[in-house]
Image: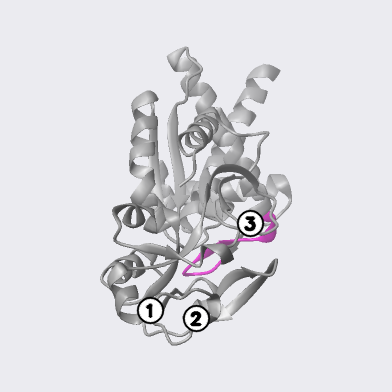
Amino acid sequence: MKIIILFIRTMDKLSNMKAFAQVAQTKSFAEAAIKLGLATSVVSKRVKDLEEFLGAQLFHRTTRRVNLTDTGYSYLEYVRKFLDELEEVEENIRHKTQKPIGEIKLAAPLSFGVKYLGPALSDYLNKYQDVSIKTFLSDRQIDLVEEGYDLSIRIGQLKDSSLISKKLSTCRRVVCGSPAYFAKHGRPEKPKDLMGHNCMSYTNLSDGKAWPFIIEGKKIWKSTSGRFYSDNGDLLCEAAIDGCGITLLPTFIVGKAVKRGDLEIILEDYEEPDFNIYAIYQNRRHLSTKVRTLIDYLSEYFKNGL
């Protein structure tokens, strides 16, 4: 009898945790109830029971919105990892196999995702038939914990974080323009020669007002001026190909145009060192098989650089 009671209590706690995680994701008890196939009152009671068990408030509740408390944020990270691992273990037991199973939520920069992730993810999915992948492409730096992503791809210098990173590849950031533009306006030989040119800038890099160069061994930001600014590198690349001006972009965006001869790289002697492309995830100890295999696959796929 004691074992039965313990089992029931464990199942109740698991149900409460699932309700909490769903409310945290949807920020709504009503929406969480729809996704779980339960009444809103049931979901509300399960979260309340969990809060009483923990002796802590997990949500700030208003008539319009439900937001996590600081305690709720901390607890959510462990709950999500626990539920993900439990789901994978259950699926593996059902299938009597240890192969990756389940959905992976992946975030990546827009241009990188459009140009490179399609073939890479297609190859991975062909290899692992029981995995599905949901992607979110944006240059906005997402919060893996708050937004519920398993994995994110980030490019360049990483900020200090509790997240774990694995290097996937390297990339250059180059100054380039079309042969027609250089024939008409001249070819800059030094960073100072950019003055007077239409420097089309990526606004997420120093607000588009300066470009970084290595001059006499030091990183120097040189002010630039131009008439075209954008938060999308592909747009700037196309404008450069059309002869509108000079731009500074990573080779994963302009590399193919350079190989075709549509763009030419200049100021190579002043380039920054190659920068890295990383896979970012939350916790190595609780990394699921599906996420681990995807990280390893992308690392092998992109190992030769972009």
Q: Are marks 1 and 2 in contact (CB under 8 Å)?
A: yes
- What's the amino acid at mark 3? Leu
Q: Label 3 vs label 2: CA separation?
A: 31 Å
Position above or below: 16 against 183: above
Nearest to N terminus: mark 3 or mark 2: 3
Q: Residue furthest top?
A: 96
> Was residue 27 drawn as part of the magenta stretch in this picture?
no
Which label number is shown at residue 147?
A: none
Task: In this rendered view, identify the residue nearer to me: 136 or 139.
Answer: 139
Task: In this rendered view, identify the residue nearer to me: 236 or 162.
Answer: 236
Q: Residue furthest bottom?
A: 196
Position above or below: 74 against 15: below
Q: Residue at x 66, y 48 (%)?
A: 75
Q: Label 1 vs label 2: CA separation?
A: 10 Å
Q: What span is colored magenta in the figure?
A: 61-71
Nearest to N terminus: mark 3 or mark 1: 3
Q: Residue at x 41, y 74 (%)?
A: 187
Residue 137 showing in the rendered view: no
Which label number is shown at residue 158?
A: 3
Q: Which residue is mark 2?
A: 193
Counting other residues with Cα less than 10 Å from the Cα at mark 1, is it few (<14), some (14-19), or many (20 or more)?
few
Task: Give residue 134's position: percent from left, percent from top.
Answer: 39, 44
Which label number is shown at residue 186?
A: 1
- What's the amino acid at mark 2? Asp
**SS state under label 1:** loop
Q: Quadrant of the N terminus?
A: top right
